[in-house]
Image (cartoon, rainbow, N blue to C red):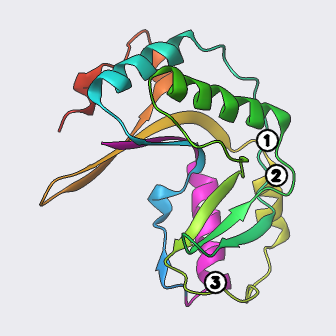
């Protein structure tokens, strides 16, 4: 199974980003479905069921993060993964701390993650052979204000696995689950 930690935008923000992206970049080759929008904190790669159990335990023990704002106010493009993204010109210190914490949890779970600078971003499209041109429609004031508010309210562990016929992706809101008193186990990740 492949997994990663991410921050999911609320429905209002998701729809606003999707609407703007579709108007501003109508010819994107492989736009990311709005339901998959997230700001990745740490890509974990292939994870065993035992590692997921360890990650769950360590998340329970992790100190809760202070709420922070995520301002998506910068467009970017990475040529190697061919990804076009909306990111942060300035990433909040609390955001960087949370990314570091989940990275450390992954390492404590036996996953060896690459050491690289963290770039907070939400992928708009994949498989872009060249950097998309400037947007046809500028982000309006309402979208800019929305993207500057506190629109992230949950940390999710996203687990993706593939069989010959099915690719499934499940989002688990770990912190809300833990607040309810129910802990995740490997059974939560079974088809």
Q: Quadrant of residue 57?
A: top left
Q: Is residue 6 magenta?
A: yes
Q: Is residue 49 above or below residue 43?
A: above
Question: Which sits in the foreground, 12 or 59?
Answer: 59
SS for dot 2:
helix
Q: Which type of secondary structure does the marked residue at label 1 adopt? A: loop
- Front label number (1 vs 3): 1
Q: Quadrant of residue 154?
A: top right
> Which element is circle 3 on?
helix
User: Distance between the Cα atoms at labels 2 and 3?
Assistant: 20 Å
Q: CA distance from mark 2 to mark 1?
A: 7 Å
* Residue 83 at x, y percent in the picture: 58, 71
Q: Position of residue 41 (x, y in %)?
A: 61, 41
From this viewpoint, is residue 107 visible? Answer: yes
Q: Give coordinates of residue 10: x percent, y percent.
A: 59, 47
Q: Which residue is mark 2?
A: 148
Question: In the image, what residue occupies the spot 71% across and 47% down?
Answer: 118
Is mark 2 in CB contact (under 8 Å) with mark 1?
yes
User: Do the residues under discs 1 and 3 have CB atoms within 8 angstroms?
Assistant: no
Say which label, 2 or 1, has the lower sequence index: 1
Q: Which residues are magenta?
A: 1-27
Residue named by callout 1 = 69
Q: Position of residue 76 (x, y in %)?
A: 72, 70
Query: Left of 91 or right of it: where is 169?
Result: left
Q: Quarter-wise, where is residue 6 in the image?
A: top right
Confirm whether the magenta stretch covers residue 10.
Answer: yes
At a point 62% along the width and 87% down the height, the residue shown is 130
- Is residue 134 placed above or below 140 in the rendered structure? below
Which residue in the protein does label 3 denote?
A: 23
Q: Is residue 137 left or right of residue 44?
A: right
């Amino acid at each position: 199974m492949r997994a990663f930690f991410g921050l999911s935008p609320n429905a209002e923000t998701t729809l606003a980003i999707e609407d703007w992206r579709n108007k501003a970049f109508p010819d994107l080759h492989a736009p990311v479905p709005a339901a998959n929008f997230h700001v990745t904190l740490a890509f974990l790669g292939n994870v065993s069921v035992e590692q997921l159990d360890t990650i769950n335990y360590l998340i329970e023990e992790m100190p809760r993060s202070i709420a922070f704002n995520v301002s998506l106010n910068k467009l970017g493009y990475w040529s190697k993964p061919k990804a076009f993204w909306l990111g942060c010109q300035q990433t909040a210190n609390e955001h960087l701390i949370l990314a570091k914490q989940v990275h450390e949890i992954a390492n404590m779970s036996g996953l060896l993650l690459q050491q690289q600078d963290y770039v907070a971003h939400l992928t708009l499209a994949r498989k872009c052979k060249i950097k998309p041109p400037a947007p046809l429609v500028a982000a309006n004031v309402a979208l800019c204000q929305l993207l500057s508010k506190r629109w992230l309210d949950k940390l999710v562990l996203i687990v993706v696995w593939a069989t010959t016929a099915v690719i499934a992706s499940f989002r688990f809101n770990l912190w809300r689950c833990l607040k309810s008193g129910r802990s995740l186990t490997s059974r939560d990740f079974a088809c």
